[in-house]
Amino acid sequence: MNRAVEKLIEYLRIKSVHPNPDYASAIRFIKNYAEEIGFDSYKEVEVHPNRIVCILSYYGTQPEKQSILLNSHTDVVPADPNYWKCDPFEGYMDDKGDIYARGVQDMKSVGIQHLEIIRKMKENNVRPLRTIHLTFVPDEEIGGVTGFLPFMDTQEFKDLNIGIALDEGQASPDNEFCVYYGERLSWWLYLTCAGNTGHGSRFIEKTAAEKLNRLLNKFLEYREQQKAKFKSECSCLKLGDITSVNLTTVNGGLARNIVPAEFKVIFDIRVTPKDTILTEFTQMVESWIAEAEGDDGDSGKITYHFENKRDEFALTSIDEEKNPWWRTLNNSCKLLGIKISEEIFPGGTDSRFLRERGIPAFGFTPLNNTPILLHDHNEFINKDSFLKGIDILYQVVLDLANMA
């Protein structure tokens, strides 16, 4: 079996899965890997209790220049084995070379690709101008607030002197490769609808359920509008170009014969930077809430708050005249003969923290002709696509690291 594939399968078998990720085993694996390849430096930084960031460095010949950062996260989301064709943490490879495991797309395969391109540089006696840093970070899957975000406040992060970062993108189902230069904002809206309560046999007025119904109608009507725009036959829009709204949690009721005094719901809202004015979008949502409450406020209010509400889009320029990093990355892909599509990432990654601080960052997962299965059942990649991605990433990173 190919050495890189063996390493990937070994990594996939580490259960760094929430809610209790085995970070100790992941760190031990990364440290041993770094020693095997022969990085110039290996550091561990505790950024939160029991949350370690691993920093692996391959020094350039002109280390005073801004560096290249290759970031990946070690944690993965849970997987229900009842819906998988194999154990999600077996790292099973079938006769076609398809490797099934939780986290194989998101994003352990990319972490291994980052490591293997440095191995390739070492074996080819290649030493670029700029230093290349690899970071392996925890807790990205739960928002990064106990992982990459506090890492950015450390001296170790400042010392990296990052010029550009490459982080996760996602697989591409066709022959193109996607490069992400920004993300939709992830807003989680928590609402509580309060109303009159009483016996389940009576027609209680001004109930929480009635307010909830009006609220759901507003949100789901908007959802249908956005979905229709996305699904339109004449549309060339990508998912990141659309604002999505999904009801993810509903809680309420004490007993089957009591009209609930309140319902609690959560909406997952992903706001696109394409043609969106955030103040207007916020006002629209607030107007829906006010209309749903109507004149029934005397029976109880609709209260709400946002979690993770960021009020500014952070995008990396894809103007070749303004951003030499993008010009180099784009030219590198052209010389490799691969076609790339510049997109807004539909979810959230640690790249947003970098962009918010003015550091150019691109999401790039070099896996094409692969169905998008991150967080899905039977997540897999093919070994040949994985190995091809190492060659692509090698040249892209080398070109970036050799920028004058």
Image (spheres, helix red, strand yellow):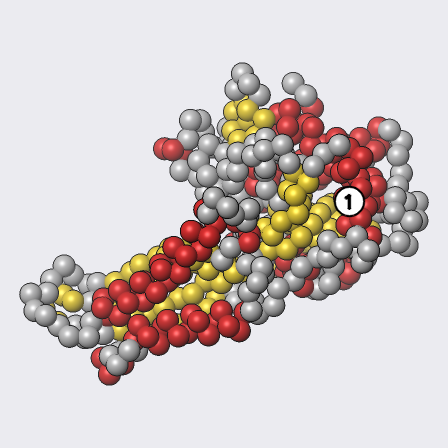
Nearer to the camera, 40 or 337: 337
Estimate the x, y position of residue 212 in percent, counting from the top left.
28, 66
Q: What residue is shown at x 36% (from left), y 68% (from top)?
A: 191
Residue 390 higher or lower than 199, as above or below: above
Choose between 364 and 21: the one closer to the eye.
364
Along the line of sight, the residue nearer the viewer: 151 or 244: 244
User: Is residue 371 left or right of 334 when viewed as pictured?
Assistant: left
Residue at 89% across / 31% down in the picture? 125
**The residue positioned farthest toward the bottom in the image shown:** 298
Q: Horizontal placement of 298 versus 248: left or right?
A: left
**Measured from the top left, where is residue 162 in percent x and y?**
79, 55
Residue farthest toward the top in the current orientation of the protein = 95
Q: Residue at x 77, y 33 (%)?
A: 336
- As rendered, which of 218 and 384 lies closer to the eye? 218
Image quarter of residue 56: top right
Residue at the image position 44 percent from the left and 35 percent from the top: 377
Q: Position of residue 345 (x, y in %)?
A: 59, 50
Residue 63 at what x, y percent from top left?
A: 89, 50
Residue furthest to the front: 234
Q: Quadrant of the N terminus?
A: top right
For the residue marked with disc 1, what is the amino acid? Leu
**Residue 21 visible, this orientation:** no
User: Position of 257 compared to 331: left or right?
Assistant: left
* Mark 1, other Cα within 10 Å: few <14 / some 14–19 / many ≥20: some
- So how many labels did they put on this image? 1
Reading the image, the residue beneath label 1 is 329
Vertical position of residue 179 compared to residue 155: above or below = above
Res 205 seen here? yes
Task: Label 1: state its secondary structure.
Answer: helix
Q: Quadrant of residue 333?
A: top right
- Above or below 108: residue 139: below
